[in-house]
């Protein structure tokens, strides 16, 4: 089934870059063991997460998600705004380009938040547990009648002060290619009267080369993707935090989606998309300085060393 809520990505095995360095088999086994240990720790600390509030709770949740990245040998590098914090009593829609199951882990390692996730994610091992514990809003993309109620729930969550992470492309891409940002979730931001925070994600190797190896694309199983990520040496996940798009900046959800998409593309050093509204006027998205695509950033804000 393919429709606006279930777009199909053209990315497949042919998009996976070659020549990425790997670790020996024993190291891969140790990485899986470390990930299981982190999940066990999440089970043990679940009651504490439910009791804690504010900064202490955020620190604990960030530690758990950062631990998963570390267990798989992934270093997290944050660019742009050093960190976006939840403003007490004010929600926001946080959107990013979608490449891998690592995306949501990295976002929560920076700032814990709820997520709008397809219902299938809730049944995934490891990640499913974490997103359920995090209060995710689940989207049944096969039941179109339930979608308006889900968008109302999303708007209500943000209106109530929650940060909610959404991947508006609707599916994963390899990272070199990308999809259009679907506008529906942006209507929830307009209805909730909250800002939009775009994030641009990119994977690199230790030598600075961009890689598509971590992409979770095509008919691949989650287990196969986990194995490939666990085998990589020196994987770096960059998260470029773009400036917020304030409420009222866009005339409608389509313009808001294009503003966010343009910010992400500019942060990745790609061609900026012109924003056109249906009000017979054209506006350009704000200029976001584009980093040189081939150069690795010099000063990481967040580092999670390989185990």
Image: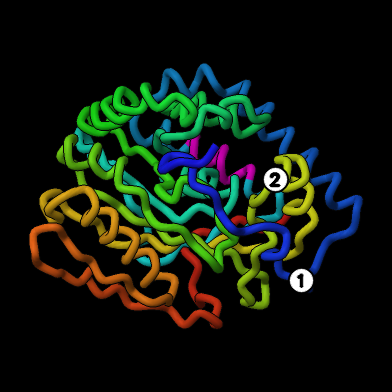
Q: Quadrant of the N terminus?
A: top right
**Would you say 143 lies left or right of 172 here?**
left
Q: Residue at x 78, y 73 (%)?
A: 19
Q: Quadrant of residue 138?
A: top left
Residue 2: x and y in percent read: 51, 41
Answer whether residue 62 is magenta in the image: yes
Q: Which residues are magenta?
A: 60-68
Element carrying mark 1: loop
Q: Is residue 8 left or right of residue 197?
A: right
At x 50%, y 33%, the residue is 118
Q: Nearer the viewer, residue 139 or 304?
A: 139
Q: Which mark is residue 219?
A: 2
User: How many marks are shown on the rendered structure?
Assistant: 2
Nearer-N-terminus badge (1/2): 1
Q: Which labelled disc corresponds to residue 189? A: none
- The spot of residue 180 in percent (x, y) is 40, 57
Q: Is residue 203 above or below residue 34?
A: below
Q: Residue at x 28, y 54 (%)?
A: 257
Dot 2 surroundings within 10 Å: few (below 14), some, or many (20 or more)? few
């Amino acid at each position: 089934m393919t429709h606006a809520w279930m777009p199909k990505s053209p990315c497949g095995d042919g998009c996976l870059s070659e020549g990425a360095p790997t670790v020996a088999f024993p190291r891969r086994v140790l990485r899986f063991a470390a990930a299981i240990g982190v999940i066990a720790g999440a089970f043990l600390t679940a009651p504490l997460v439910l009791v804690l509030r504010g900064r202490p709770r955020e620190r604990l949740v960030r530690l758990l998600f950062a631990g998963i990245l570390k267990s798989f040998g992934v270093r997290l590098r944050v660019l742009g705004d050093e960190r976006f914090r939840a403003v007490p009593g004010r929600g926001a829609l946080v959107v990013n380009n979608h490449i891998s199951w690592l995306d949501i882990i990295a976002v929560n390692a920076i700032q814990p938040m709820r997520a709008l996730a397809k219902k299938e994610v809730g049944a995934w091992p490891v990640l499913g547990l974490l997103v359920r514990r995090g209060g995710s809003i689940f989207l049944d993309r096969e039941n179109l009648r339930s979608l308006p109620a889900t968008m109302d729930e999303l708007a209500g969550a943000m209106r109530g002060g929650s940060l909610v992470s959404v991947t508006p492309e609707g599916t994963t891409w390899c990272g070199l290619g990308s999809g259009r940002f679907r506008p529906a979730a942006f209507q929830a931001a307009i209805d909730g009267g909250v800002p939009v925070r775009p994030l641009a994600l990119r994977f690199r190797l230790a030598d600075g080369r961009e890689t598509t190896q971590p992409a979770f694309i095509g008919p691949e199983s989650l287990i196969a993707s986990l194995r490939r990520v666990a085998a990589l040496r020196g994987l770096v996940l960059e998260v470029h935090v773009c400036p917020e798009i304030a409420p009222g900046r866009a005339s409608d959800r389509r313009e808001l989606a294009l503003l966010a998409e343009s910010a992400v593309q500019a942060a990745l050093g790609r061609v900026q998309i012109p924003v056109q509204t249906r009000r017979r006027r054209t506006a350009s998205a704000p200029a976001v300085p584009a980093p040189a695509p081939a150069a690795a950033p010099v000063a990481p804000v967040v580092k999670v060393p390989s185990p």
